[in-house]
Image (tube, grey):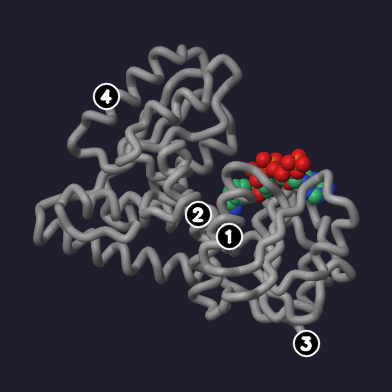
Amino acid sequence: MAGKLIDGKEISSQIKAELAQEVGRLQKENNITPGLAVVLVGENPASKVYVGQKEKACAELGIFSQKHTLSAETSEAELLDLVRSLNEDPDIDGILVQLPLSGHIDENKVIETIVPEKDVDGFHPVSVGKMVIGLPGFRPCTPSGIMELLKRTGVDLVGKEAVVVGRSNIVGKPISLMLLAESATVTVAHSKTRDLGEVTRRADVLVVATGRPNMITADMVKEGVVVIDVGVNRLDGGKLVGDVDFDGVREKASAITPVPGGVGPMTIAMLMYNTVQSAKRRAGAPVSV
Ligand code: NDP
């Protein structure tokens, strides 16, 4: 029987509705409007789409968004100056510099210049360090979106075999740590893994973030697996597919995310979540990050 669809659109809508209420309360009780600054450098078409989606989500929730569009020729020093001024801006609770940046700008330097208190992307080494040792702090949006999908689908992770395929700083590594924090037994696979299928077949929960279209096939999973497909790949004909062969794998899975409509919408919802938490901290209210 085909596995249940984990509907990221629906779950992200629930999260956004909850956040819209919190934004309303912050405005009413504390006279505070959460503020997100988004910085876009250059003309990368995908980056423009992502920035547009983030602005739209802010507008939906009543979050103030401030977009800074800089030319591709912007120097690293100019970008760092902008980040420093946003660090000081009392109306801004979150700063997001859309990645990737062009080659002449050191991404790590930019990320490290954002104050950790406004690091709503969760990429600052301080945020990453806090995640590693289990302290509160901003968690990166895509993996925290995956954790919300699992939680709201009722997937119990304690003692389960979780396999993560991919070890990037933005998805693979952080999701591995977050699954571990929930007491799953975590295995991380990557391009040098010998016999990937042997590893993925162990998974009760399989998270795939490789950017390789349809690479996980039905023979690589066991019956009843829960599959989270992070991949976003555009095929030659224009069709968007994940890293998992959806139709084949769904036959064996107990639950699976579609692409599109799975992890993607969650990433933006969790960015909104982090921004609202940051604004709550400004209001002196208890926060859950
Ligand atoms: P990266 O390219 O940074 O990392 C890919 C990882 O996959 C690497 O660790 C690589 O291993 C591993 N890998 C590649 N090929 C294989 C293979 N044949 N077998 C096993 N492992 C392999 O990608 P990201 O983590 O940034 O993104 C992954 C995918 O997720 C992309 O499609 C991206 O578009 C999507 N994505 C979606 C988001 C969303 O919001 N929905 C957000 C972020 C990403 P190695 O380290 O050895 O090279």
Residue marked by disc 2: 267
Q: Secondary structure at mark 2?
A: helix
Return the x and y of residue 167 as percentages of the image width and height: 68, 46
Q: Label 1, label 2: how many angstroms apart (C-alpha)?
A: 7 Å
Asked if labels 3 and 1 touch by Cβ distance under 8 angstroms, the answer is: no
Asked if 259 appears above or below 52 in the picture, the reply is: below
Q: Mark 1 or mark 3: which comes first in sequence? A: 3
Residue marked by disc 4: 85
Q: Amino acid at mark 2?
A: Thr
Q: Residue at x 82, y 62 (%)?
A: 199
Disc 1: residue Cβ within 8 A of ligand 1's nearest atom: yes
Asked if 243 appears above or below 43 in the picture, the reply is: below
Q: Is 48 on the left or on the right of 237, as rendered?
A: left
Disc 2: residue Cβ within 8 A of ligand 1's nearest atom: yes
Please rate how many residues cluster around mark 2, counting C-alpha atoms within 10 Å: few if below 14, some from 14 to 19, many from 20: many
Q: Label 3, label 2: how many angstroms apart (C-alpha)?
A: 29 Å
Q: Amino acid at mark 3?
A: Met
Return the x and y of residue 216 as percentages of the image width and height: 82, 61
Q: Mark 3 or mark 2: which comes first in sequence? A: 3
Return the x and y of residue 204 as percentages of the image width and height: 71, 74
Residue marked by disc 3: 1
Q: Residue at x 46, y 36 (%)?
A: 125
Q: Quadrant of residue 15?
A: bottom left
Screen quadrant of the C terminus: bottom left
Q: Label 4, label 1: how many angstroms apart (C-alpha)?
A: 32 Å
**Mark 4 or 3: the one toward you:** 4
Q: Amino acid at mark 4?
A: Ser
Q: Mark 2 or mark 4: which comes first in sequence? A: 4
Q: Amino acid at mark 1?
A: Val
Please rate how many residues cluster around mark 1, counting C-alpha atoms within 10 Å: few if below 14, some from 14 to 19, many from 20: many
